[in-house]
Image: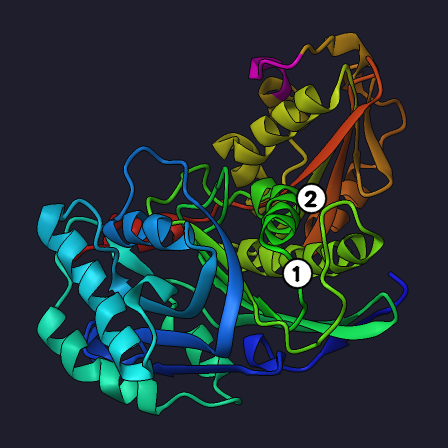
């Protein structure tokens, strides 16, 4: 889009944002397992969380804290999710916020908490208590990548992005880090995504912009159809750009929103591309549905089908599995109207294998690391898209021994 420039770095590309990531002893082997994002000034904040009925203690505490609308720090741990840990788990999450708040001299209610990892185990709080002062001391305007590494679980590497966008003639910066490559099909957020901007924006406008961007990015991805108990997406807006305050319905908020959507889409696609055991990033586009809702329903059904995903892994143009996935969805489907393409190569017309189909060409496309499955239901104007990945033996290996 015009007026948008991608930058090096992630969340610390934003003026006034410091970050750190260290090994605190939660994980074996010395990998980073604690992360901190800190704004040098109080920031307006907005966040969305998992809609799973089983919510981790950090999510419950952060839901309380975000109600105040001002957040200055986000502390996150990886290796233990602090989920299904009862009242002691809530106490541990609150203590993490309190310790960080005390160390950076802000109220604990101005701290969000996030944890990811194995469900059902208590946090090793003795190790975390000892490590948090070191985490705070490590805060740096170049610490974004360390923070991105501190939140990883089965990810193969950190995910970060930053950009500058023109808002009413003034440059505004947005940066972010994300993690989560398994237990991914969010319906409000994704595993973790922490964002920051130097824009001046009203609280309700920031919340609206975040929810819109999440809907179009993180709510359009799937790795395995499962939804985490710890999903958290949060944004801090510290106002250092000194632009005129952005309100709902304003042109400036639309410009900021376009930048936010660009960065969340980039991070969302990085998550799917690094999905557990994944070798392919595949966009499933459904058009011709009766309406947009049914287009999304049909696209999700294809994107989540284990049979479709294993065929993608094996580069097998088994289009019958796509027809099956469409037909089992709650979207209205008439088989004799369905068309299917891999990129621009036609495979199915009128619900049957197309005459003159070039299966060798389809297999070539499926061998790529990225491609698109286009589906036309031939029933109406509805169109939607979902990003998915293939399902490999490696996914089974990772998850068959996750706690052992």
Mark closer to the observer (1, 2): 1
Residue 59: image location, x then y, percent = 32, 50
- Asked if residue 267 shows in the view, the reply is yes
Q: For this rendering, which residue is in front, 87 or 396?
A: 87
Q: For this rendering, which residue is in front, 7 or 343?
A: 7
Give the vertical position of 241 relative to 354 (above or below). Answer: below
Quadrant of the rendered image containing residue 336: top right
Give residue 359's mark: none
Residue 146: image location, x then y, percent = 43, 82
Q: Residues within 10 Å of mark 1 (few under 14, many from 20)?
A: many
Q: Residue at x 52, y 39 (%)?
A: 310
Q: Residue at x 59, y 31 (%)?
A: 300
Write the start and end of the magenta stretch as one range: 326-331
Q: Residues within 10 Å of mark 2 (few under 14, many from 20)?
A: many
Residue carrying label 2: 283
Q: Does the magenta stretch include residue 328?
A: yes
Give the vertical position of 365 relative to 241 (above or below). Answer: above
Q: Which residue is drawn at 28% across and 37% down?
A: 54
Give residue 201's mark: 1
Label 1 vs 2, first from the N-terminus: 1
- In the image, 239: left or right of 236? right
- In the image, 162: left or right of 313? right
Pick the quarter of the image with the C terminus.
Answer: bottom left
Quadrant of the rendered image containing residue 152: bottom left
Residue 246: image location, x then y, percent = 73, 58
Q: Do the residues labelled 1 and 2 touch (CB within 8 Å)?
A: no
Tag 2, which secondary structure?
strand
Tag 1, which secondary structure?
loop
Q: Which residue is drawn at 12% across and 69% down?
A: 125
Residue 32: image location, x then y, percent = 32, 79
Q: Is residue 370 magenta?
A: no
For marks 1 and 2, give the CA distance: 33 Å
């Amino acid at each position: 889009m015009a007026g948008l420039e991608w930058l090096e770095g992630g969340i610390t590309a934003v003026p006034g944002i410091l970050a750190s990531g260290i090994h605190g002893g939660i994980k074996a082997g010395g990998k980073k397992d604690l992360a901190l994002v800190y704004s040098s000034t109080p920031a307006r904040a907005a966040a969305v969380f998992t809609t799973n009925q089983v919510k981790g203690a950090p999510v419950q505490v952060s839901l309380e804290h975000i109600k105040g609308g001002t957040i200055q720090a986000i502390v996150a741990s990886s290796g233990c999710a602090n989920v299904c840990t009862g009242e002691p788990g809530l106490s541990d999450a609150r203590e993490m916020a309190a310790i960080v708040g005390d160390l950076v001299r802000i109220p604990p209610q101005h701290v969000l908490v996030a944890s990811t990892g194995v469900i059902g185990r208590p946090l090793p709080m003795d190790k975390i208590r000892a490590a948090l002062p070191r985490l705070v001391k490590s805060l740096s305007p170049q610490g974004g990548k360390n923070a991105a590494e501190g939140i990883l679980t089965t990810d193969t590497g950190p995910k970060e992005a930053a950009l500058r966008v023109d808002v009413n003639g003034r440059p505004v910066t947005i940066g972010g880090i994300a993690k989560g490559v398994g237990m991914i099909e969010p319906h409000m957020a994704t595993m973790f995504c922490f964002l920051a901007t130097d824009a001046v924006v009203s609280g309700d406008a920031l919340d609206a912009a975040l929810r819109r961007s999440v809907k179009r990015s993180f709510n359009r991805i799937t790795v395995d159809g499962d939804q985490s108990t710890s999903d958290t997406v949060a944004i801090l807006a510290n106002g250092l750009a000194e632009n005129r305050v952005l309100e709902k319905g304003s042109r400036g908020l639309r410009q900021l929103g376009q930048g936010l959507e660009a960065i969340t889409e980039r991070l969302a696609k990085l998550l799917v591309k690094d999905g557990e055991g994944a070798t392919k990033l595949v966009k499933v586009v459904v058009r011709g549905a009766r309406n947009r809702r049914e287009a999304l329903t049909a696209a999700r059904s294809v994107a989540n089908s284990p049979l479709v995903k294993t065929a993608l892994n094996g580069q097998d143009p088994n289009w019958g599995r796509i027809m099956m996935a469409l037909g089992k969805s709650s979207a209205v489907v008439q088989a004799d109207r369905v068309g299917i393409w891999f990129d621009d190569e036609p495979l199915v017309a009128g619900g049957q294998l197309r005459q003159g189909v070039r299966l060798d060409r389809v297999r070539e496309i499926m061998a790529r690391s990225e491609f698109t499955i286009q589906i036309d239901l031939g029933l109406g104007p509805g169109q939607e898209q979902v990003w998915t990945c293939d399902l490999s033996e490696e996914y089974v290996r990772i998850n068959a021994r996750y706690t052992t």
